[in-house]
Image: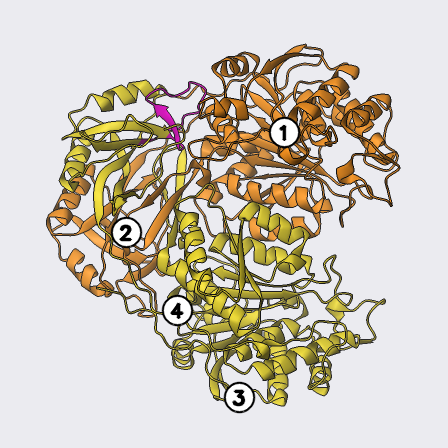
Chain colours: A orange, B yellow
Amino acid sequence: MQNQLLKQDSIKPQTGTRTRVAVAKGDGIGPEIMDATLKIMEAAGAQIDVDFIEIGEQQYLSGNTSGISPQAWEAIKNNKIILKAPITTPQGKGYKSLNVTLRKSLGLFANVRPVTALHPYIHTPYPEMDVVIIRENEEDLYAGIEHQQTEDVVQCLKLITRPGCERIVRYAFEYAKAYGRKKVTCMVKDNIMKLTDGLFHRVFKEIAAEYPQIESNSQIIDIGSARLAARPEQYDVIVTANLYGDIISDIAAEIAGSVGMAGSANVGTEVAMFEAIHGSAPDIAGKKIANPSGLINGAVLMLAHLGQTEVADNIKNALFATIEAGIHTADIYNEGTSEQLVNTSEFAEAVIARLGETPKNLKVSKLSEGAGTIQIPEYVRQSRKKELVGVDVFIDWKGEDPNQIGDALAAIDAFKLKLKMITNRGVKVYPKGLKETYKTDHWRCRFVAMDATTASAAPVYQPVDYEQVVALLSKLHAQGFDVIKTENLYEFDGTRGFSLGQGE
Amino acid sequence: MQNQLLKQDSIKPQTGTRTRVAVAKGDGIGPEIMDATLKIMEAAGAQIDVDFIEIGEQQYLSGNTSGISPQAWEAIKNNKIILKAPITTPQGKGYKSLNVTLRKSLGLFANVRPVTALHPYIHTPYPEMDVVIIRENEEDLYAGIEHQQTEDVVQCLKLITRPGCERIVRYAFEYAKAYGRKKVTCMVKDNIMKLTDGLFHRVFKEIAAEYPQIESNSQIIDIGSARLAARPEQYDVIVTANLYGDIISDIAAEIAGSVGMAGSANVGTEVAMFEAIHGSAPDIAGKKIANPSGLINGAVLMLAHLGQTEVADNIKNALFATIEAGIHTADIYNEGTSEQLVNTSEFAEAVIARLGETPKNLKVSKLSEGAGTIQIPEYVRQSRKKELVGVDVFIDWKGEDPNQIGDALAAIDAFKLKLKMITNRGVKVYPKGLKETYKTDHWRCRFVAMDATTASAAPVYQPVDYEQVVALLSKLHAQGFDVIKTENLYEFDGTRGFSLGQGE
C-alpha cells in the first residue's frame, strides 16, 4: 500500500486568484509593522482578503499553552495562508513555541530564507550577496527524541526520511525554476553520516538530474558553511537538512547585516506561513518607530507564493528604492548614507510613493521572470525486501575491560546468534580493541546469525528470526545483563542497512 | 566501581624537559614543509628529539588499510607526541581516514584550532580576530552508528557523554588559564536538544564556576555561528561539541583567510598530535615553493603543549615578523603588501633570522604569560538510582491512520503495560493527533506501567520490570507487528531521563 500524503496540486496558485489570508498582528511592534505592511500591499494591488486571527501573548496568558485560540486554528485551517507579525512568548513554564507547534502540526516542511545585501545602506563585507536558504523544517535531530539510559551517556535520534528529503530537495529546484534562480547547492555531512546524510545527498542527485536547466553541486557542510561565511556571493539557492539550515540561515542573515530586514516562509503542502525573522521588540513597542522591512519582505514571499509575482516585485523594488533614497527608520539610520529619519508609517508612505520604481544600485527584484508553479509530486514508497540479519543490543555495564563482557557474551547460548563485536562510542573494543580507547558505561553489542561469515572485510549476513532476538534479550536479562536498548540490523534487497563500527 | 581512565597527571609537562617526538614527514609538500619546520625549531632551541615514522600514502599502497606501519604505531605509543605533515589518502575503497583512526583509537578528545587574523598581509574583513576553537573530537553524531529499519527512515545516533563533556570543557578552561586567555564561550543547541546538548551546557556551567578568574558565557549554536562569522573579534576561546566544532572551526579559518596558515592540535590524556590544517597539495609537491606556516603553527602548539612556551612564542613572533616584512611564499604573495617572493627554505631562513624579534603590527604571541599546567582530573561517575518505567517500541507500519495502529496497540494485553502515545518523527499522532501531520512508516509507540498517571501535564511513572518489556515484544511480534528497535525509559533518582513527544 502506498501513501497518498502529498497531492499533485500546485503549491503556488495561478496569477489573478484572490486569496483569503489569516493575518496575526502579533505582539510588541507587531501591530505597527503589520499595519504598515497591509497598507503597502493594498496600495500595490495585492489580490488578498484579510481575516485577522488571535495568537500570541494574550492567548498564552489566558491559559492556551499553545498560544493559539480555537478560532485562530479554524481560520488557519480554512485559509491555509498565514501572514504573521512577531509574537511574545511569556516567561514561565508550559508555554510551547508557537512556531514549532504550527510547523510540526501543519507539516510546514520547508523554511525559506532569502538574504540580499543592501550595501552600502546596510553595512556588509559582502555587497554582492543574494542567496536563498531552503531548510528542511520537520525532521533531523529536531524530532527531539532523547533518552538517557546510563549514568554516562545521553542519546538523541537523528531521523532523516526519504519523503522528507524528496520534498525539500524538490521544493528547492521548483523554487529555483519558479523564481528564476540559476543554481542549487546541497550541503550535508555524508562523508561521516553515510546512511542519513548519504540519503539526503543521493536524493539531491536523483532530483537534480530532472532539472538539467538548473546548475547543481554539493559541499560538505563544514566547508560549505565556511565558504558561505567568507564568499556568500558564490551561492544562489542552498538546500540542506534542519540543523545545518538553522545554522547557515542565521549566518547568512548576520553577515548581510539584515536580521532586521529579512523575511522568511514556512511552506507545507497545504498551509504556508510568512513572517519577519526578527522578534517583537517590546522595548520600542507603541513608539511607532519600528522598521517594517522584515515583515514587508515576508509579505513579498507570500505574494510570490500566491502567484502574484508582479505585485511582489513591485513592492520589493519600491522598498529597495526607498532604502536607496536614504529614507530610513532609526534602526538603520546613519549619518553617512541616510537622508531622512522616518517613523513606521512615514516609511510605509515612502514605499507606497515609490511603487512602480526600480532601484538604481540595489538588485532589481525579478521574481516574475521565473516559470511555472511549484509542483511537489506524491511520495511513492519503494518496496524492497527487508530482511532481519542481526541486532545491536546496548548494555549498561560499569566494568572497564571489554574482554570481560565480550567473553561473557560470546560464551552465551544465544539461540543461533553469535557476538560479532562490541563498540563503545562507535569504536570497536572487542574483539581486539586498543587499550588506549576510552570506555563509557554504554556498550553496543552486535549479534548476527551463527552462520554469518563475519571474518572477512566484506561480511555475508544470514537471516535471523525476531523470535531469536526476543529469546536473546530474555536470556541476557536472566544472566544479569542490563539491556537498555536494541537496534535491529536489516538488509534491503541484500544491501546492508547499518554502519560498521570504527575499527571493525 | 569507578573508572580509572583519566589520570591526574599533567598533560602539559614542566618547562625544560627534553621530549622525544614521533615525526611524520607525510606526502606531497609534507617533506618540504617538515624540513623547514624542524630547521626553525632547532634554531629556536626547542628541547625535542626526533623519531621519524612511516605513515600515509606508501603505507596505504603497501596494503596497510590504516595507513600506519606497525613500527609507526609503536613509535607513537612510546613517544606519545606526534608532529605530522599532511598525508595523501589514495583514491579507492577500503582506505580508512588516518586522522579518524588516530583520534578514536588513541582517545584524542580535544581538537584545538587557534585562528589569528594576519591583516593586511592576509586579506580578512576581521583584522582583530584572535580566537581558539576547542572541539570535542570523539563522540556526538561522529560515533557513526547508523541504522535503516524502514523504507522511509534512516537514523543516526547522537551520543553525548558526561565524561566526554567534562574532559573537553575542563580542557578549554585549563587551556585558557595556561595560555593567558580571558574568556570561554560554550555553543550548543540545548533549547531543542535538552538532554544531550543540555548535558554539555550543564557541565559547562558546573566547571566554569571553578574558574572565577575566567569569564564565561553560552550561546545557541545557530546564533553563535552567525556572530562568529560576522564579529569574530568578540570571541576568545570557544568550546563546543564535535559537529558544531567541525563547522565553526572551518568558518573561523576561512573568514581569517588562513586555511594555508593555521595549525591544529589533537590532544588526549596520554597522546597528542600536531599538524597544519591544509592538505598535501600534490600539484606543487617537489617544487619547494610551499608555505610552511601552517605546520610551523602546528609546531608552536606542540611546543606550548610541552611546556616550552617561551620557545613557542619566539618562533610564532619570528613567523609574524617575517610576514610583516613582506617576505612571502607564492600562495600569499600579492603586489600590494609583499616585498619579496621566497621559496620554502628561504622562508624558513627568514624566520630563523628573526628569532628574538617581535611583530610591530600583528599581535605579539604571549603564550608564556599563562599560568600552570593543564590538569584533567579523573572522571568520577555518579551513582544514582536508575529505575525502568517504560519502553519506546518502534514499529515499521505502512498504514496511514494512526488510530488504526493506536487502537490495535491499546487493545493488546500488554503484561500490565499500557500504550501512552504514538509519535511519528517526534510529533504525537495518537491519541488525538492532527490529520495535517505527515506520517512516515516509522512509529514510536510508548508503553508505560498500567498504574502510571499519564493524563496530567506532569505524569507520574511507575516501575516496570524488563521481563514485561520482553513479553510485550514477544506478543507484538506474535500479533504481526514489525518491531524494529526499542528504547527503554528510565528515571534517575526520580528524574525523567527521556523527552516527551511534541504535542504530548
Q: CA distance from mark 4 to mark 3?
A: 24 Å
Instruction: Label 2: state its secondary structure.
Output: loop
Say if residue A430 shows up in the picture.
yes
Q: CA distance from mark 1 to mark 3?
A: 63 Å
2 vs 4, front mark: 2
* Quadrant occupied by the C terminus of chain B: top left
Coordinates of residue A464 in the picture (x, y in percent): 21, 41
Pinpoint residue B150: horizontal percent, then vertical percent: 35, 34
Residue A219 at least partly seen: no
**Residue closest to the eye, A325 or A441:** A325
Residue type marked 3: Gln
Label 4 SS: loop
In the rendered image, residues at marks 2 and 3 fall on the same chain: no
Task: Look at the numbered discs 2 and 4 and tell me whether their residues touch, using CB distance below 8 Å.
Answer: no
What's under tag 4, amino acid-wise?
Leu
Q: Earlier in the sequence, mark 1 or mark 2?
A: 1
Q: How many other residues sit within 10 Å of disc 2, few (<14), some (14-19) or many (≥20)?
A: many
Horizontal side of A151 relative to B191 (left or right) equals: left
Which residue is under mark 4? B106
Alpha carbon distance from label 4 to label 1: 54 Å
- Determine which quarter of the picture holds residue B389: top left
Q: Where residue B47 is drawn, which disc sits there? A: 3
Residue where numbered disc 1 is placed: A28
Discs 4, 3: same chain: yes
Q: Which residue is mark 2?
A: A150
Q: What is the three-letter code of the residue carrying label 1? A: Gly
The chain holding disc 3 is B
Going from N to C along the chain, the mark reached first, 4 or 3, is 3
Q: Chain of mark 4?
A: B
**Distance Cα–Cα, label 2 vs label 4:** 24 Å
* B220 is higher (above) or lower (below) than A343: below
